[in-house]
Amino acid sequence: MSPGPKHGGNLRQASEASGLPQQELIDFSASINPLGFPQWLRPLISAQISHLAHYPDPEASELATALAAHHQIEPDQVIVGNGASELLYLLPQVLNHKRLLVPVPSYADYTATAEAAGLQVDTLPLLAKDEFQLDLAQLSASLTDDHLVIIGHPNNPTGKLCDTRALRQLILQHPQNHFIVDESFIDFADPVHSLRWQRPGNLIIVQSMTKSWAIPGLRLGYALADQKVVTAMRHMRPDWSVNSIAQAAGVRALQDSDFLKRTRDYVRQQRLDLFTQLESIHGLHPFPSDANFLLVRIDHPTLDASALAQNLLKRGIIIRSCGNFKGLDNRYFRVAVRTAEEQQRLCAELDACINAVSLKKTARKTPAIMFQGTGSNAGKSILTAALCRILFQDGVSVAPFKAQNMSLNSCVTFQGGEMGRAQVLQAQACRLDADVRMNPVLLKPSSATGSQVIVCGKVLETMHFNDYAERRSGIFTQVQQCYDNLASEHQVMVLEGAGSPAEINLKSRDIVNMNMARYADAKVLLVGDIDRGGVFASFVGTMELLNEWERQLVSGFVINRFRGDATLFGDALDLTSQHTGKPFLGTVPYLLNLGLPEEDSVDFKDGLIGTDKKEGKVLDIALIDLPHISNFTDIDALRVETDVHVRRVCRVAELGQPDAVILPGTKNVIRDLDYLVTSGLAVAVRQLAEAGTEIVGICGGYQMLGEKIADPHAIESSRETVQGLGLLALETTLQPDKIMTRCHATHLSSAEPLHGYEIHHGTSTGDNLKPLIQREDGAVIGSCVADREHIWGTYLHGVFDADGFRRWFLDRLRQRKGWQVIGKIQSPYDLEPALDRLADHVRASLSMDEIYRLLGL
């Protein structure tokens, strides 16, 4: 036996010895539940903080009563302690024995507690040739009437259970002896092996709750014994040794049997995998175990366990050298069961140390960072685009990624796949062509409870949200494949989350926030919109609702859309960091007139589209706000013009006498047509058309301008046919197959070139219509009435993006009003300067050095 650490799990000491930060160490020396503590622990602790102003119950009565009910015994047979160690130290002092008989190797405190009580210690060797199995016949033969017996069940460090039936029989055969059976690790084995049921009178069960519930910092344990023993222990135990938070945690733990079952299932599989890996390493001999750790012997001519532990510590791995256990020598060490990834790293490092095997270069995950929000519309998409452009400017090959987007604002790639418009903008920030791998799943809501599901750019089907949830695991596999393929082509990935990661009703089915971040090994920056108020509460609240593994993924906070004087923050940043343990990595000031497409229809619905009122002779263009509006970015190019004011219209009273009315795209033409009729907007638009006002329909809006829409396949409605606005002699039939294509076209009346894309289910035909917009292949995708060209529509999304046509369109409106035409392009719709401006703005606001450090760049 050689000197060494008395216990495992001393991270501070290991950090000082290795020179590595504690968070970079993997601790195999402490045998704690690899699943970590349960989700309910953090909120329980938070709820108990107010009780810290009072002394805890010195008898832990509520917990003792709960334990008695759990074990079907009387409360006076239960004592709660400050961990199992406190109870183990009390027992030799109250049981009046002169000698201790203890199998070795075993937990060092068994001997220490007996020696502290003045007992003579006798040991019973457990032999490696017997795989350290306790020989109960030999134990019985070694007993004298003076002996107190302490047995680990499972034993530490061997992990072996005793023959439960035989041990119970032995205890009954020796009523003059007391037997302390330490079941601190029994929760990791099959509970059928516990001796706590029908406990003999001379048996004391000691149980730690810190191992199985992963709360060693709280210190909690209990003992089951006869009433006289418990009373004697209570008289010797210091008052208030168990704090109120630990007591509350113990009560709650007894209600969560599912957690222990999941723990056992997980540990059983991980233990088997670890044993198999260790057994395959030349020079190592692992011993079978029933607990959450394995005892291992190293058979090497020059390397012992102590030297091995030192080598591993330099590599960031802590193991428990067991040379200081009685009955073992410097060849033995113990390792805890941990996660699969951690165990694989341990075994690779062990092989490298023992056999000079070169570490296999595992494919390192592409460095990744992810913006998640405290809620929707926090600015995640714009910040993602900004960081993409910053990294591109710095010479980094970067790509954006959003696993799942719920949006009616989509675009078609050059390959003909459909994806979210926000990821198209982010791709442009990286100077990349849009690729459906950047947004593998697009959900386009078609009702309050259903969406059209688009996977890898193609329509899967329209599903109820519950149906989609059931199929999400399979879809997530496709998402992961898309991510891996895309990430393999770039140096850095910038991911975007959706909504909030703290939506506890949805977290179990998440594929876009923390589960995606974990898969990508992404550093998460949590974004809060201070312009909406409550940003500090949202940071703290979000963190409080995250699971422990999710919290560990969060690297810091970003405040977005800040207006005013930063000194007004006072100590709010420091207080928030104190509450959460996370730093602030930047405050991004509000940037007006971004000149970029919005993330989704949120800003449009909030009415922000009508706030850019301009001075002088300004054209008034009314955009009808449809309930299922989609691709509303079709009007973004109009908004940059200095002589145009675009405003949102929801009601007839808001319509007025605009110079032009635009009916935008919609995900549900039939329902939105019903809305126009019931709101009175249908009549009002017809009246404006008769008065000569320019009426423009784009995609679904184009279909609405017609006379009839047929839906024979019930794609949007159970009604086979509905009447349109009747402004164009056009009939549309909705088809199951969606048309998705990028294209170039010509506006025939102006001869101006156009570019954009089509996304629609319908095919439209009509008589007496004048072709207005024609694709390069000759197909007509826009038309008007021959003698009323002020009423027209098109399937082309992005029709106003072409600078020449947009100015022609606006000058025609000016001419009708008797204003002088401008005749030349005023405001080129070029997103590149806007992206560079955004990047400069965000670069100056974020801690870029820290972001680069997080990315390992």
Image (spheres, rainbow, N blue to C red):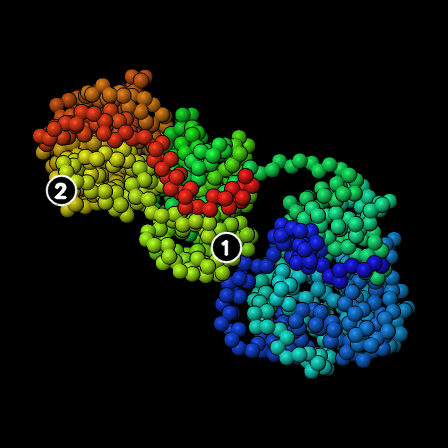
Q: Is residue 190 visible?
A: no
Q: Is residue 600 visible?
A: yes
Give the image quarter of residue 82. bottom right
Question: Relative to 312, is 259 above or below?
Answer: below
Residue 657: mark in rendering: none
x and y, in percent, of residue 112 in the image: 79, 70
Dot 2 corresponds to which residue? 656
Give the image quarter of residue 836. top left
Q: Nearer the viewer, residue 786 or 386?
A: 386
Seen at 77% across and 72% down, the residue is 113
Q: Which structural element holds mark 1?
A: loop
Horizontal relation, residue 740 to residue 476: left or right: left
Dot 1 corresponds to which residue? 582
Q: Nearer the viewer, mark 1 or mark 2?
A: 1
Seen at 23% across and 32% down, the residue is 697
Seen at 33% across and 37% down, the residue is 596
Q: Earlier in the sequence, mark 1 or mark 2?
A: 1
